[in-house]
Image (cartoon, grey):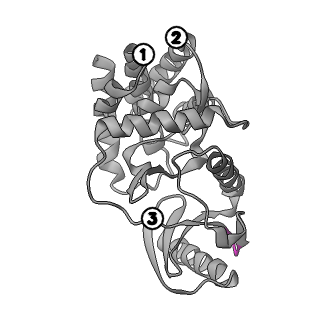
Amino acid sequence: MEPLSLRRAVEAGRATASELGLQVDDVVVIHNSDRVALRLEPCGALARVAPLEQLADSEFEVEVAHRLADAGAPVAELDPRADGRVHRHDAFAVSLWTYYESVESEIAPADYADVLLRHHAALRRVELEAPHFTGRVAVALGEMQDAERSPELPDHDRELLTGTLKGLSAEIADAAAGEQLLHGEPHPGNLLNTRKGPLFVDLATCCRGPVEFDLALAPEEVGRHYAGADQALLHRCRALNWALFCAWRWRRNDQMPDREHWRAEGLHRLRTALGH
């Protein structure tokens, strides 16, 4: 978020918690993108604050959190003091979550694979309507095929991304032996190493597809520890996810920090993945 929107989002998070009777003397911005994550002290809550146009996504995330908590999934939980729902304040949707202190040690690849296996098992026990991964690809294609929405993307890179998104999504859908509910973005930034063990966060990205689609976003070594993973399909999914990453970075309104670096790095990673 831009500075003015960020200040309003911080105030929305603070005010929502205060209205629920939680004491907030300090707010720390943990993550700032199209929505923000805020640590509220001394009440010890984490606020996720999104523009109201993302209200449906915030409500979907809360619903997923409820279902997965009931299924015993290794996920961060909603703050029980906040009624387990999304609150509206000003022009923002606010949800309150339990804040977990991080453990400094890294999560070993075998442990990462184990927590993802357990998460996938819990997801199979959940009845939930969620979009197919090809829907995400269709949105990215829309960005790439409309030069006004991605005006700075060179033509040859536009052709690369469009061809990759179309071709690999079709190949993956045809090659997958089975599909299920997925986390959608289980990359290291969405897996917290806590005193309770590794816990997944950012649950609004749930979609349906093969488990290899999720595995492709974990560190490469993790896939070798995940029982039953189709390594050839995993390589295709990894390339597709880099194409998706690039599509988001070339959007006119993308707000990722250091965007210029990640535009170039994403295309390099994509070409490397395609070469494999």
- Is residue 90 a member of the stretch shown in magenta? yes
Residue 155 coordinates in the image, percent (x, y): 41, 29
In the picture shown, does residue 211 fall above or below 5?
above
Residue segment shown in magenta: 89-93
Secondary structure state at the residue bearing disc 2: helix
Q: Answer with left or right where residue 116 lies relative to residue 48.
A: left
Q: For this rendering, which residue is in front, 147 or 199? A: 199
Quadrant of the rendering where the C terminus is positioned:
top left
Real-space Cα separation, disc 1 to disc 2, in angstroms: 10 Å
Residue 100, numbered label:
3
In the picture shown, does residue 273 fall above or below 99?
above
Residue 15 coordinates in the image, percent (x, y): 64, 82
Q: For this rendering, which residue is in front, 262 or 224? A: 224
Residue 175, numbered label:
2
Q: Earlier in the sequence, mark 3 or mark 1?
A: 3
Query: Which residue type carries mark 3?
Result: Tyr
Depth check, mark 1 against mark 2: the one in front is: 1
Q: For this rendering, which residue is in front, 254 or 74? A: 74
Q: Answer with left or right where residue 257 lies relative to residue 74.
A: left
Residue 103 coordinates in the image, percent (x, y): 32, 60
Query: Which residue type carries mark 2?
Result: Ala
- Residue with the mark numbered 1: 230
User: Quick one: label 2, few (<14), some, or many (20+) residues within 10 Å?
Assistant: few
Magenta span main SS: strand
Real-space Cα separation, disc 3 to disc 2, in angstroms: 39 Å
Q: Are marks 1 and 2 in contact (CB under 8 Å)?
A: yes
Residue 25 appears in the rendering: yes
Q: Earlier in the sequence, mark 1 or mark 2?
A: 2
